[in-house]
Amino acid sequence: MGKGVVNGLSTLKDIAELVGVSVSTVSRVINNDTSRHVNPDTKIKVWNAARELGYEPNESARRLVRNQKEGPIMSKKIGCIVASTQLRDDHPYFSPILTGLNRKLVESGYSLAFIHTPEEVNTEMVLHQMIHNHYIDGLVIIGDEMDQALLDYIKATSLAVVGISASGSGIPLVDYDRISAAKAAVHHLIAQGHRKIGFVGGQGHTGELKSEERYQGYEFALYEAGIPLDPTWIINTRWQVDKSYECMTDLLEKHQGEAPTAMFAASDLLAIPAMRAVIECNLRIPEDIAFIAMDNIDLAQYTSPPLSSVHVPKAEIGMVAAKALLDQLQGESILTTKILLPHEMILRQSSIFSRAGSPRP
């Protein structure tokens, strides 16, 4: 431990000496001072040193450092960071995942210490404090909204960590094969005789639509079938439900007589308002425009007509993520960095209508 450590408590100078940088550089990192650039690798080294030396900017975490002098302490608490505040509420897709996650943790004697959003954990210092204030042993990250710098910090710590639906994060992930599932959904529409197939969804982890795996599956399916893609039938809602209704209405008004005969939606929540837009334009589902979507949330079976959807094993994803995290805590290595669970097609009336000249399935 650094020369300046007094009574087991480290200082900025100790961190600076261990990393080999100036005290002012350490101060800028610890205080999230962005007025001057600090190399990302240096920031990670500073936070690693702070963790190693037991530096904490608050008294509650300092007590944890003193306790750790007597030996490692497992709090049996897990933190969770979700993409938005909506996911903490009764979200039809993510709530079952959280339920499965929590169920497996409780069965193993663990509990969720907190559920926060990236906006609430917006700096390395805040995240550093949160990790130690709650004495957590591991962290679950749900969604793609985590800042890369924070992900780099998390990966550099000794915390067990696993991601759910967190594409491109560089941490162990539990999910389903979104590209394959989307292709299966579009292939179903093609088998029903559709060649004018639109898309409604949102952007991927890069902020662009083309980086979203369900959109990629949609494109691949059309390409494999030799069907041209009409960009005017592509709706990017940026995952806003209201935009789905508005943009679908606009599409139908602009393409009267040349509208798509089927729509693939990246989620049930985006399909449902788009279906409403079709009905309000005095068109029939599936005779005029068929729909198939992803997730198979409970509400999908109660739409009018019932919505065809790709079933995603949501609770199981949460339970498998918890198991992967617990395995890390027990010192077991993860054999793969990405665990994909199987999906299943659930066909209902919104897509079952064979058009004239449709190929045999």
Image (cartoon, rainbow, N blue to C red):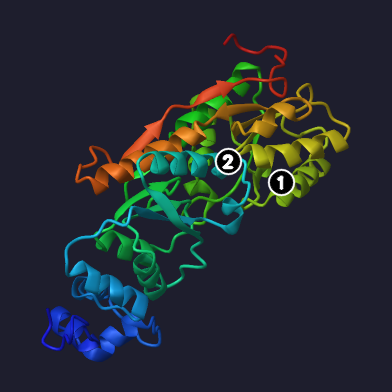
Left or right position of 354 against 296: right
Mark 1 and mark 2 lie on one chain; the one further toward the N terminus is: 2
Residue 35, percent from left and from top: 40, 87
Q: Quadrant of residue 303?
A: top right
Residue at screen point 24% across, 86% down: 12
- Mark 1–mark 2 Cα distance, whole angstroms, equals 17 Å
Left or right position of 49 against 3: right
Residue 328, percent from left and from top: 25, 46
Q: Nearer the viewer, residue 53 or 238?
A: 53
In the rendered structure, find residue 93 and report the number of the disc placed on it.
2
Left or right position of 334 against 187: left
Residue 356, percent from left and from top: 72, 12
The image shows residue 202, relative to residue 359, as above or below, that is below
| Closer to the eye: label 1 or 2 | 2
The image shows residue 89, relative to residue 278, as above or below, that is below
For label 2, the crowd category at 10 Å Cα-Cα, with few meaning under 14, some 14 to 19 and many 20 or more, is many
Secondary element under disc 1, as helix, strand or loop, is helix
Q: Nearer the viewer, residue 9 or 33?
A: 9
Q: Quadrant of residue 156?
A: bottom left
Secondary element under disc 2, as helix, strand or loop, is loop
Query: Which residue position is annotated with label 1?
Result: 244
Q: Nearer the viewer, residue 312 or 349?
A: 312
Give the amino acid type for the residue marked by disc 2 in the picture: Tyr
Could one spot residue 69 in this view of the protein?
yes
Residue at screen point 19% across, 71% down: 52
Could one spot residue 37 in this view of the protein?
no
Q: Which of the image's four quarters has the C terminus?
A: top right
